[in-house]
Amino acid sequence: MFAVALAVTGVALATADPWVPAQKRLHYPVYRPAFTAGLPLASLRIQSCGPGKDGSVFASFGRGSSPNGFGHYRGFMLGEAFPFQCSDFGDASLVGTRTVNGVKAYVFAYCDPSASKCGFLDGVALGYVVRWRQPVPTSGTLRKRTLVTLISSKLTFPELLRIAAGLKQVR
């Protein structure tokens, strides 16, 4: 099967609500999904990007967000960073663009390496990656365009768009 190259080496945040402590550690806006397609939060980690740099947030939802579950179970990973993420999402092919939260998003699909073509519909079975920069927040002191990456396993594209549309800034 396919390996997702998001090695998260940060320390898990051990609180009832890990989103607020994550936001307090970082100097860019952090977003939490209001809609999770019924999938529970499995983990939230901050991966270090090196001394003096903000880390990247990686939250996983459902069994399909783990390396062993990817492609087998429903799940998704939400990555957030500024100005860049400290890892990549592996080998996926660009299959289009969409508008997410009023901005241009790039849509990638994981594809069967033995196939000669990779198309948009391959993402349904093998997983999508949707990446965009959130609009600048209209309030608060963190006025940066957070880079957001959603990676899916066994989710439909409309479900991913609903997750993206429901992102709320952590305060």
Image: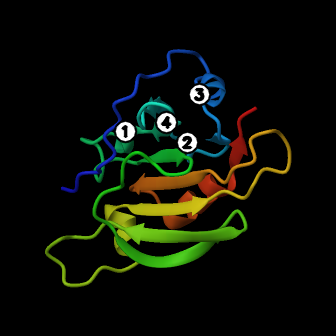
Residue 81 is marked as none
Nearest-to-viewer mark from 3 and 1 = 3
Q: Residues within 10 Å of mark 1 (few under 14, many from 20)?
A: many
Q: Which residue is mark 2?
A: 38
> What type is the residue that disc 1 sits on?
Arg
Residue with the most extreme left position: 114
Q: Which residue is mark 4?
A: 55
> What type is the residue that disc 3 sits on?
Ala
Q: Are marks 3 and 1 in contact (CB under 8 Å)?
A: no
> What type is the residue that disc 4 sits on?
Gly
Secondary structure of residue under mark 3:
helix
Residue 22 is marked as 3
Separation of disc 4 and disc 3 at Cα? 10 Å
Nearest-to-viewer mark from 1 and 4 = 4
Relative to 141, residue 5 above or below: below
The image quarter containing residue 93 is bottom left
Residue with the most extreme right position: 139
Residue at image position (65%, 42%) is 31
Point out the image quarter for the N terminus. bottom left
Where residue 43 sits: x, y (%)? 45, 30
Point out the tag, 3 or 2, that comes first from the N-terminus: 3
Point out the tag, 1 or 4, that comes first from the N-terminus: 4
Residue with the most extreme front position: 52
Relative to 95, residue 4 above or below: above
Point out the tag, 4 or 2, that comes first from the N-terminus: 2
Separation of disc 1 and disc 4 at Cα? 24 Å
Q: Which residue is mark 1?
A: 63
Residue at image position (49%, 36%) is 55
Q: Are marks 3 and 2 in contact (CB under 8 Å)?
A: no
Q: Are marks 4 and 2 in contact (CB under 8 Å)?
A: no
